Structures are given as C-alpha cells and as structure tokens.
Amino acid sequence: MKNHRNTIFYFVITGGFSALIYWILALGKGLEVHKNFLRPVAENGHWNDFIESMSQNLHHPLAILLAQIVTIIIVARFFGWVFRKIGQPSVIGEIIAGIVLGPSLLGLYFPEFSLALFPVDSLGNLQFLSQIGLILFMFVIGMELDLKVLQNRAKDAVVISHASIVIPFALGIGLAYFVYFRFAPEGVAFLPFALFMGIAMSITAFPVLARIVQERGINKTKLGAVVITCAAADDITAWCILAAVIAIVKAGTFVSSLYIIGMAMAYVLVMLFVVKPFLAKIGELYATKDSINKPVVAIFFLTLIISSYTTEIIGIHALFGAFMTGVIMPDITKFRNLFIEKVEDVSLILLLPLFFVFTGLRTEIGLINDPFLWRVTGFIILVAVIGKFLGSALAAKFVGQTWRDSFTIGALMNTRGLMELIVLNIGLDLKVLTPEVFTMMVIMALVTTFMTGPTLNIINYIFKTKDDTDLEEISITNFKKYKILISFGNNEKGKSLLRLANSLVKKQNNKATVTAMHLTLSDEVHAYNLEEYEKDKFLPIIEESKNLNQEITTLFQATVDIESNIAEVANNGDYDLLLIGLGKSIFEGSLLGKVLGFTTRIINPDRLIDKFTGKEGLFENSPFDERTRQIIAKTKTPLGILIDKDLQQVDRVIIPIFSSEDAFLLDYAQKLITNNNSKIKILDVNANSNDNFVLKSAINSLEQKYPKNITLIDENSIKKDLLEHLDLMIIGVESWKVLLDKYSVWLRRVPSVLILKH
C-alpha cells in the first residue's frame, strides 16, 4: 500500500480539484445573463476562425521579429560559411546576406514575400535590436585593445597609423568637393558631408585585420606586432575623430560643436580617472576566480549602459560610450576573457547579423543604374585604396620597413569590413549621406575587404626572398625524419596524445620530431591577449614533454575552420602521422543526439558537397562524429584517432587483425617495441594470417625478431581480465566498424583505443 500512496494522493488531488474547477465554471455561465454577454457565433466555421486566428498571430510584431531573426541567422551563417571556404572573412558573406535579403535581390524578385517578412513598420524593432548588438560588439572591441602593446610599440606604429588616417581623410574630403553638388542631400552643408566622406575613407576594420594576421601565422612576428599596433592606434584615433565629426554634424557649425566636444572630453576624463580605478579594484578582487558572480556582472553591464547613454545624450553616439567602457575594463587577461566569452557569442551570432541585414535593407544596388554612377563608384573605390593602401605603405617604408612588409601593412590597413558599415549607417541616420552614396560606399567596403587576401597572396608571390628558399631546404632536410603532429583541444587529451607520440619515437629523438598544435576557434573578433592564452594552453603540454624527455615544437593558430586547418597543416607539413582525439557530442547515445545527427547530415554544407562529389559513400553509416569525419575526409597523411581513457603508458598493447588490410598496423607494433619496449599481443581474428602469405610472413618476422615482446593469440584467448590489464588497443579504421558491430563488448574493457588510417 505504501508503494501506491503517492499515486493515490496524486489522483485524489488532481481529480478532486479538477471537478471543483468544472463546477465553478458551470456556475459562472449563469452570471453571463446579468452582463448582457453575447456568445460569439462562428459564422465562417470553426476551421476558418482558426485560420484567421493563425493569420493574426503571424502578423503580430513579435512573431514577425522572431521570423526575421531565424531567417537572418540562417542566411548570414550560410553566406559566411561560403566566403570562409573561399578564403575570405565571413563578415563579407554576412554583408552579402544582408544585401540578398534586402531590396537589391529579395525585394526585387520576390516583392510580396519581402514585404511580408520585412514590413516597413517592423524595421524599427530590427534597428533597435541591431543597435544593441553594435553596443555589445563595440564593448568587446574596446576590451580587445591591449593598451600595453600601444605603449611598448607606439613609436613607429603611431606614425604609420596617423599617416594611414590623415592621407585618406584628406583624399576623402577632396572627393567630397567633386561629388557634393551632385550627391549631397538637400539642406546639408559641405562641412558635415566632407567630414563623413573623409572618415569613411580612413576607417580600418581592426577585428577583421587581427583575424587575418592570426590566420596567416604572422601574429608572433615583428611585422604582425606592428600591424596589430597600427590597427589599434587607428581604431582609437578614428573613433575619436568620428565622435568629433558627429558633434559637428549635430551642432551644425564647428564653433557650436566645441560645447559637445568639451563635454565629450570631460566624459573621457571621468571614465579614465574615476570609473577605471573603481572597475580596476573590482577586477583585482575577482582576478583569480574562474567565474564572476551576477552582482559583479551587473555592475559592469550597468557601467556599459550608463556610458552608452551618456555619450548618446552628449551627442557623440552610444557606440563611442560602449567602446570607451571596453577600453577601461580591468587590465587582467582572465577577467577580460570571461567577459568576452559572455558577450561575444550573443553579439556575433545573434545580434550582429541583424545589423548586416538592416544595412542590406537600406542598400539598393538598383540605385546605381547608370554607367556614370558605376564610374563614380569605381572612383570612390580607387580613392579609398590609394589613400589607405599607399598611405600606410609609404609611411611604413619611411619608418624603416622593407617594401614587402610595407605593402603588407598597406594591404591589411585597407581592410574596412564591419567598422565601415557602422560609420556609413551613422551617416545615413544623420541624413548626411543619400541612399545613393550609402550604396556606393557599401560596395567600396565590400571590395576593399575582399581584396585583402588576394593582395597579400600577390605580395608574397612577388617578394620571394631567400628566407623562403631556406625554409624549403629545411623542410626537405626534415622530411627524412619521422614527423608526428598531435592536435589537441584540451590539456588532458593533449598530454595523452603526447605520451602516445613519445612511445613511438622515444629512442629516436634525433631522427624524429613531434609537433604539438592547438587551434582556437576565432571569428571576426580575436581572443584578447592571445599570447597569454597560448602560454596557458601549452604550459601543461610543455611540462609533460619535460617529464618524458621529449623535445616538441609548438604550433598555435586562430581559425574559423578547425577541421580544415588541421588537415591543411598535416598535408602541407609532410607529416608521417597525425594524432587527434575523438570528439564526442553531449547528446551521444540519446534520441535527441540521433535527431540532431540526422539533421546535421541533411543541412551541413560540407555533407552536401560530399554528396555531390561522391565522397559521402565513404562515410555512410560512419561511427565517427562530424568533426572527426571531416578530418578523416580532408587529411591525406596517416592518421591516428585516440579514444582516450586516461592513457598513462603504452606498455601493454593489443592489435586485432581482422583482414589483410590491417598488415600496416605491424609497422606501428615494431615502432612501439623498438622505442618503448612494449609488449604486443596480436589477435588474429578468424585466423586471417593462415590465408594471407604476406600477413603471415610479417607476423612471423616480428615473432622471430622480438620473441619476448610479441604474443600471437586468438579469440578464445580473450578473457575479461586480459583486456582490462592492457593499456591500449590499436586497430585499423575499417576494422573499427567491424569491432563496433560484432565485438563492441571488448571496448568496455580496454582502457584506450587508437584507430589508425593508413
């Protein structure tokens, strides 16, 4: 009876009170007579009433906004993926996505659908949400700026940076002189129009530039340090100039704007000498903690909002206040990283695409419908490139850079990206720019950002130096060595991979090299103080290498496509073996996991490409997760996938042979015996060696050469205690599928498994 007590109580309570509710509702119907209540009559039928209700719900502002957000995120991520695949920053794809969803394409060919998805009265909500996204984004940009870098390397960088601003600024004002009469809005004076043309020409996209520098691996070089410092100084200077320009535009005259500029300077002084020390004290208290509690987060976000509100009221735009708040954040790497992680995903993934699409809705390519207008657009692009590219390059050459480095700096500083769009939208909101000029300048932003990658490639091709030849000679020399590349995500898995690599080359250190690689996922905004992040990530690996007496080379990169980059490094580096850990999903083994996996296979663009190119069949019913599947597909070098169960040593190993194709595993057995003195048990499943002369000869050769290290066993010898006392199972990639189908019970007993692809 006690076992059913809760069930009885549940039915008594729910049933009794349900009856009470029904009785009260029945009595309530009698009250309707005294209120002259008329019961609605379904004239069109209940189904039509339901359809009408659904139609009203679909046109509700919240429903429209949610539909817009879903559409925008999907389209923006798709175009971002496409442009990443062709070696371009994803921000270009997201800008293109905005133009596609705007009147230039969707509105032109599907006007009814465009009007239904983006009705005019809904654009206000979209604009406000996008502005919130920009405020969070500029807050992160401010935090990304490492002011210590500016202090240490400011001498040359400030010269290059300010030259890269003043030269295009002057050219932009000169351009404004020629286009003012034809393109300036009615009632707008020459001064504000010219100033906005100047600032639009001189802006640099610091986050896009920083990511390109990291992806090309020059962030640790002297050139990379100079470029990052130049971009940081450029960012600070440009935003200060923009604040002054906005003040002048809103005030009407330069003299009137001095009041606004004076208040802005007072605001900056308060932020630097009052708010910054206060926030620094809070940062010191929480510097050593792994998380920040909600009251502290509330203080910092409240500071952000008040700062943005203050600058908006003063008249220099809320974005400057957000940027300034990020700059004065406590100068503690861990503390800033925690905040960036909290803000970055919401800003970049959810809210910033809304800004791109809102910009796209304002961009009407159809306005440029005349050859003359396209010539003007081309001239704007030419002036922008000459001013920024050549201005930066000549200044860099003047301070002592080589021509190659000078042109590289010029190409990178010419990148405009998202920052340009922010300036242009402010100009359009202030009615300083017409929709025609706005569209021309958006095209200029796209072209100058798109050309950065190809320009860098051309510069590298033209300026082939002796250093490049030396590197090629070194790589040819090293090719004779046995080269292992380990790619790790977390430290524990990295240490296990290092122990495994060490066991393969331990006694041949002079004839082998081990490279430990860590890739960090980075979109348009780079991680704050990557040098500190890299140091923290590699410290446990370096300590483990010292314990093993194993020399290693470290390799660190920021990327937007980890799987492709792992394969690219392995393929281009002529490695003999790539070792990775098996990725696992948090939904693994659940019904949700199966649904998500099926959905991923349908909508994943890489899967679709594999389908069309015929590669999908290679991985049909693949037992690997999506990340590992992509690495297997793209890697041409031998690959080892470690299923790590805290691998500490590789002394006792079992190698199951399921077919003659597994003969290559015996090469690894020999390496383990030679370098690590491992004890190898070869499990000849179904006595395959009896039917294959080559396989049998290889096994016999190992038995004769290493009688104390090799033991040949069959399935009957497999006992529970045998598997549990082993360190590692090594198996071929094709046999792995067979093992999962027929012998999966073994996997619960073996501590770790290494899956090898020849």
Image (cartoon, grey):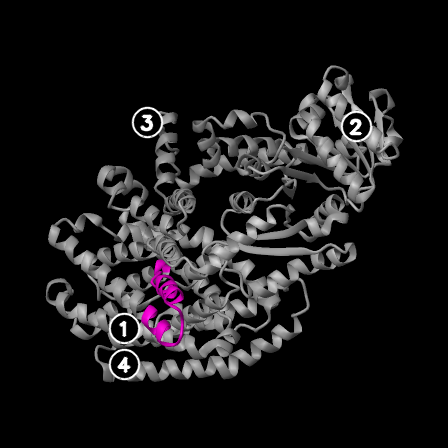
Q: Amino acid at mark 3?
A: Glu
In the rendered image, the quadrant that contains the C terminus is top right
Q: How far across and how far down the image is residue 709, in percent? A: 85, 35
Front-most of 161 and 502? 502
Identify the image quadrant of the N terminus: top right
Q: Which residue is mark 1?
A: 167
Estimate the spatial distance between the alpha carbons at disc 1 and disc 4, rounded to whole Å. Answer: 24 Å
Q: Point out the frontmost of discs 3 and 2.
A: 2
Q: Which stretch appears magenta?
A: 392-418
Cα separation between marks 1 and 2:
74 Å
Counting other residues with Cα less than 10 Å from the Cα at mark 1, is it few (<14), some (14-19), or many (20 or more)? many
User: Marks 3/4: CA distance?
Assistant: 64 Å
| Mark 3 nearby-residue class (10 Å; few <14, some 14–19, many ≥20) | few
| N-term-proximal mark, 4 vs 2 | 4
Under mark 1, the amino acid is Ile
Closest to the observer: 465 or 440? 465
Is residue 485 a member of the stretch shown in magenta? no
What residue does disc 3 label? Answer: 43
Q: For this view, does 204 lie left or right of residue 728? A: left
Q: Which residue is mark 2?
A: 701
